[in-house]
Each structure stands twice: as C-alpha cells, then as structure tokens.
Amino acid sequence: MNRRYFPITAVTAALCLVAVFGFLHLAPARDLPPRIVLDNAGGRVLFSHGHHAADLGLDCGDCHHDGADPEHPEACGSCHPAAFDAAYTAAHAQTFKSTRSCNRCHAAAPDPDRPTDRPDVTHVPLRADAFHAQCLGCHENMGAGPFGEKSCNACHQQRK
C-alpha cells in the first residue's frame, strides 16, 4: 500500500470506530421528561417537569394522581381525553402501560365483544378541565405563578 494512504486509512478507521461507539452507546434513561409540550386550541403550553420537581420540590404524586403505578404514572390523556369520542374509545386501551388501570373506570376487564359495556365517565373531566383544575388550583393554593381567568397567556403561547 502506498505510504500516503496510511494516514487517510487510519483517520477513516478512527472515525468509523467513533461513529460505531456513538451509535451503540445508549443514552442514560431520565427519571422524568425535562419538559412536555401540550398542543391545544388555546395555544401551546410548555410545561417544565424539571422546574416543578427539582426547583419546587414537588413529587410526581402531587400532580399525577395515578394510584395504579406511582413510579410510572400514565400520560394525562390516557384518562383525560380531549373528548370522549369514537377515536378515544377505539384507542384508549393501548395508551395504558398495564391492565391494572382498567379497574379505575371499568367494574371488570372490558370485553371487546360487548361494545356497549361502557363506564359512566360523567365524573371524569376532559383533559382541558383536568389541567385547568390541577394547574390553576395548585398555583392559586400556593399563591405563586399564573392563576385566574386573565392569566391564560402566561401558559398558553399564541401561535404566530
């Protein structure tokens, strides 16, 4: 092999090894998502888990009232949909991590052959109502942060 190709080959091999290592190296799992984006008709809301958990010292159970698995709470939309419509009815079973969650609304394990066997969801607030009650209620009780009817734009970022 020609001597001038040796440095090129060595650099290429080193870069390939770095690329393979970077591809195979798994990122460490996070305990909680740093922030989530809630996209809705009122304007996008950017919620910071890090600020509420680390800076304010809130525990997951302070916001996620999920008794089925307190270490890994369900997504809010699993129980609190935008609407109790056909799309939610068809897809909501796949949003839960475990069938243990079924008994919070269903008296027994749901039977797919009996589509009329539906729980009464009149006591379950929709996602917007649940967020407004939970978030605004907590802010008002703590006397900090945005709360009240005129504070919408403090959380909801208007689309441009």
Image: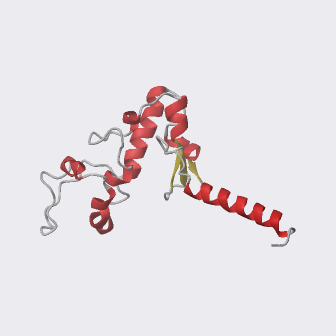
Of residues 115 and 144, the one nearer the viewer is 115
- Residue 31: give x, y in percent of width and height: 46, 40
Q: What color scheme is it?
A: secondary structure
Name the residue: 18% across, 54% down: 120
- Residue 27: give x, y in percent of width and height: 54, 49
Name the residue: 55% across, 56% down: 24
Point out the image quarter for the N terminus: bottom right
Q: Which residue is farthest front?
A: 1
Q: Which residue is farthest right?
A: 4
Of residues 157 and 67, the one nearer the viewer is 67
State the count of labels.
0
Name the residue: 38% across, 58% down: 82
Of residues 50 and 119, the one nearer the viewer is 50
- Residue 50: give x, y in percent of width and height: 54, 37
Query: Quick check: 65 left or right of 33?
Result: left
Name the residue: 27% across, 60% down: 93
Q: Is residue 160 visible?
A: no
Query: Quick check: 116 left or right of 138?
Result: left
- Residue 57: give x, y in percent of width and height: 48, 27
Query: Quick check: 89 left or right of 42?
Result: left
Point out the image quarter for the C terminus: bottom right
Q: Is residue 40 visible?
A: yes
